[in-house]
């Protein structure tokens, strides 16, 4: 079996987004000219959290190309300073941008978004995977076309829970406003946390703010634990259907055992009714939805991590635009390679990859 190093295959371009530990860049495959998105993860900033990256790879490998609403992993590799995950390039932007760019926005539009998100979630759950960080920022669109596929992205907190050691998860993780009560109480959680998050997203899609918005994180947590939310102010909800409210209520059930499942949710009247009849009497929700989204953006309330904290982390990223000398493994060819140097983490990366069923990374020239 050959151990010939693979040539460098990508060139990075403009930055598409950023998080606390990573930036997302447009990347071009040199041979084909095809564009992808490369999630560039700084090793120093992720020190002690390397398992999140490896776990994301494992999850994406299990579901990639299996569902139109799931982001596809194309490649992954590492350089001296960074880890790279190459995925579909979502040219249609984030959910927020999509809604705000519309000339009009109706409940039926929200239904289509929820349907597509739920379809992806149901697929994940059927494959033993819980996402654990569903939120509008992680819902992207493949193209700018009106009928573009919606893509569920960012699987860094996801877990494969059909494995015995992950049957019950107890790690506190996620974005606070979208986290289910059982995550805060550490009572053990699983797939139902995604349905809670979908309930929060659905509520948000209908009014432009989340159900547990409070003046402090402590008050927000207490509201979540108590299931304390309401469909108000009335002027924002008077044109929203009872079916929509009931769907939200069933998702935001504090008792996870009684919470609606992904399979059950797909049969809920909110999603199965004849939208052509609904559209006849719909009211345009865009004015107040767009206004509330803009206000949340202005106050930096869109993310569980403050913008200042993110920017401080990003300023420390010294990521090279060149990928020469990177370590690379391409899922599509499964070519074996040399043992990498510069591994991260306490255990050797080679051993950990083997534990997770992954091949060693291959050095690129």
Image (cartoon, rainbow, N blue to C red):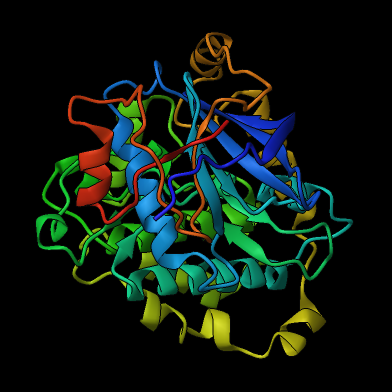
The answer to which of 199 and 194 lies nearer the viewer is 194
* Residue sitting farthest toward the front: 1
Query: Which image quadrant: the C terminus?
Result: top right
The count of marks equals: 0
Query: Which image quadrant: the N terminus?
Result: bottom left
The answer to which of 362 and 104 lies nearer the viewer is 362
Across and down, in percent, residue 265 comes to: 42, 78
217 in relation to 77, above or below: above
The answer to which of 61 and 299 lies nearer the viewer is 61
234 vs 120, left or right, is right
The answer to which of 8 and 261 lies nearer the viewer is 8
Identify the residue at image location x=44%, y=57%. 60
* Residue sitting farthest toward the right: 103
Across and down, in percent, residue 159 comes to: 29, 54
Q: Quadrant of residue 308?
A: top right
Does residue 288 appear in the picture of this structure? no
363 in relation to 240, above or below: above
Identify the residue at image location x=33%, y=35%. 339
Does residue 240 appear in the picture of this structure? yes
Across and down, in percent, residue 2 comes to: 44, 51
Identify the residue at image location x=39%, y=16%. 44
54 vs 254, left or right, is right
């Amino acid at each position: 079996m050959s151990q010939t190093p693979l040539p460098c295959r990508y060139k990075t371009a403009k930055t598409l987004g950023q998080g606390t530990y990573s930036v997302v860049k447009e990347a071009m495959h040199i041979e084909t000219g095809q564009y992808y998105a490369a999630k560039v993860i700084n090793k120093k900033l992720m020190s002690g959290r390397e398992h999140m990256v490896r776990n994301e790879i494992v999850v994406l490998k299990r579901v990639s190309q299996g569902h139109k609403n799931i982001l596809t992993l194309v490649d992954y590799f590492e350089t001296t300073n960074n880890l790279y995950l190459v995925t579909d390039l979502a040219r249609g932007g984030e959910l927020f941008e999509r809604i705000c760019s519309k000339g009009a926005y109706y409940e039926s539009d929200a239904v289509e978004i929820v349907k597509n998100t739920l379809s992806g979630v149901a697929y994940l759950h059927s494959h033993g995977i819980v996402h654990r960080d569903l939120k509008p920022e992680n819902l992207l669109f493949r193209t700018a076309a009106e009928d573009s596929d919606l893509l569920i992205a960012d699987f860094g907190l996801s877990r494969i829970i059909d494995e015995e050691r992950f049957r019950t998860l107890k790690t506190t993780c996620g974005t606070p406003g979208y986290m289910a009560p059982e995550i805060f109480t550490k009572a053990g959680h699983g797939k139902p946390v995604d349905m809670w998050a979908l309930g929060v997203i659905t509520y948000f899609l209908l009014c432009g703010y989340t159900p547990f918005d409070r003046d402090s994180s402590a008050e927000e947590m207490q509201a979540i634990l108590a299931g304390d939310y309401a469909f108000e102010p009335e002027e924002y909800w008077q044109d929203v259907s009872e079916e929509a409210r009931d769907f939200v209520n069933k998702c935001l059930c504090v008792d996870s055992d009684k919470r609606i499942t992904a399979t059950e949710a797909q049969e809920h009247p909110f999603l199965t009714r004849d939208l052509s009849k609904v559209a006849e009497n719909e009211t345009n929700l865009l004015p107040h939805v767009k206004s509330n989204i803009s206000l949340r953006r202005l106050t930096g309330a869109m993310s569980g991590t403050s913008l200042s904290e993110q920017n401080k982390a990003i300023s420390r990223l010294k990521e090279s635009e060149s990928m020469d000398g990177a370590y690379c493994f391409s899922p599509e060819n499964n070519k074996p390679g040399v043992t990498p140097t510069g591994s991260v983490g306490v255990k050797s990366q080679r051993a950990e990859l083997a534990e997770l069923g992954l091949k060693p990374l291959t050095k690129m020239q």
